[in-house]
Image (cartoon, helix red, strand yellow):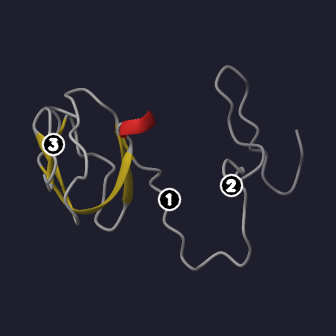
Amino acid sequence: MGAATSVGATVIPVATAFGFTANQSITIDSDANQETAVVVSTTGGRGGATITIATPLTRAHAEGVQVSGSGITLSKALSQAHASGSPIVSGAPTPGAPNQYLGSGRKP
């Protein structure tokens, strides 16, 4: 977050809006102060961007807290429930380890 925000704000100043898109669900802050919001629009680039959200913030947030989103949009509803933290794909890159993508159904 590029600056502190107050309860009721619908425009969030951020360092960059790159990667955020309309209708994306985002997470603001962490721990007891964490909340989620839905992006309506973004403006600006690096060093002076904003994210407008659909509903007002329910908590105040300090400058520098993390604003994040997965960037994942499902094309249709899931057919079954999945536990929180379940992997989306197997064989994904792991920091500090070789990439595991081999294609054609081959396993590492």
Q: CA distance from mark 3 to mark 2?
A: 30 Å
Q: CA distance from mark 2 to mark 1?
A: 10 Å
| Residue 37 at x, y percent in the picture | 32, 57
Q: Is residue 78 left or right of residue 30?
A: right
Residue at mark 3: 45
| Residue 90 at x, y percent in the picture | 77, 48
Q: Secondary structure at mark 2?
A: loop
Q: Are marks 2 and 1 in contact (CB under 8 Å)?
A: yes
Residue at mark 2: 88
Q: Nearer the viewer, residue 106 or 34?
A: 34
Crowding at mark 1 (Cα within 10 Å: few <14, some 14-19, many 20+): few
Q: Are marks 1 and 3 in contact (CB under 8 Å)?
A: no
Q: Is residue 69 left or right of residue 9?
A: right
| Residue 69 at x, y percent in the picture | 41, 49
Residue 85 in the image: above or below residue 21:
above
Q: Residue at x 77, y 43 (%)?
A: 91
Q: Residue at x 30, y 30 (%)?
A: 65
Q: Is residue 37 left or right of residue 52?
A: right
Q: Nearer the viewer, residue 99 or 59?
A: 59
Q: Tell me the kind of residue under disc 1.
A: Ile
Q: Tell me the kind of residue under disc 3.
A: Gly
Q: Secondary structure at mark 3?
A: loop
Residue at mark 1: 72
The quadrant the N terminus occupies is top left
Q: Residue at x 68, y 30 (%)?
A: 94
Q: Residue at x 16, y 32 (%)?
A: 2
- Of callouts 2 and 1, the N-terminal one: 1
Crowding at mark 3 (Cα within 10 Å: few <14, some 14-19, many 20+): few
Q: Tell me the kind of residue under disc 2.
A: Ile
Closest to the camera, between mark 3 and mark 2, is 2
| Residue 66 at x, y percent in the picture | 34, 34
